Amino acid sequence: MVSEARAARVALNRLDEADADLRRALTGEARRWVQGRAFAELGKIADLRRNRAAARASFQKALAIAEEDSDPIGAEAASRWIDAPYAPGR
């Protein structure tokens, strides 16, 4: 799945590639739940780049979309990192 590849780039610390892919997903005709999960991954990237304000905003956007689109998996993934910075392996 394409979104798994994007998430893998984040996990592998290929942040510039992941960021570009995720932003493309937001401009296309992606389903809302896919957009929500893209925002969650962008939040992880922002945290890895030590931009907590941008990370928190992305996670909040991801959570709002997940709740709006009845996506409990996306909601859990986003809400987990709103109050604590993303760290791989946690």
Image (cartoon, helix red, strand yellow):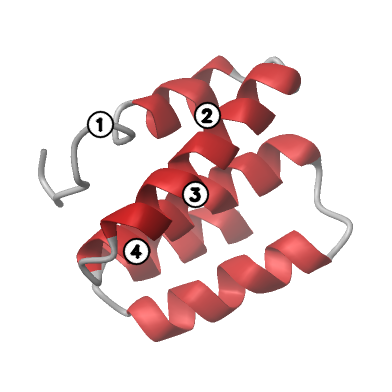
User: Residue 17 location in percent, x, y?
Assistant: 46, 83
Mark 1, secondary structure of its residue: loop
Identify the residue at horizontal 20%, vertical 67% (top origin): 50
Q: Earlier in the sequence, mark 1 or mark 3?
A: 3
Residue drawn at the location 57% of the way across and 55% of the way down: 3
Residue 72 against residue 79 in the figure, above or below: above
Residue labelled with disc 4: 46
- Under circle 2, the secondary element is helix
Query: CA separation, marks 1 and 3?
Result: 12 Å
Amino acid type, label 3: Ser
Q: Earlier in the sequence, mark 4 or mark 2?
A: 4
Relative image position of residue 56 (x, y in whole percent): 38, 45
Q: Position of residue 9 (x, y in %)?
A: 37, 70
Figure label count: 4
Q: Are marks 3 and 2 in contact (CB under 8 Å)?
A: no
Given contact means CB atoms under 8 Å apart, are the residues at marks 3 and 4 in contact? yes
What residue did someone put label 3 on? 58
* Tag in front: 1 or 2: 1
Question: At 43% across and 33% down in the image, what residue appears?
Answer: 78
Q: CA distance from mark 3 to mark 2?
A: 12 Å
Question: Mark 3 packing: few (<14 Cα in 10 Å), some, or many (20+)?
Answer: many
For disc 2, the marked residue is 74
Helix, strand, or loop for circle 4? helix
Determine crowd level at label 1: few under 14, some 14-19, many 20+ residues with C-alpha closer than 10 A. Answer: few
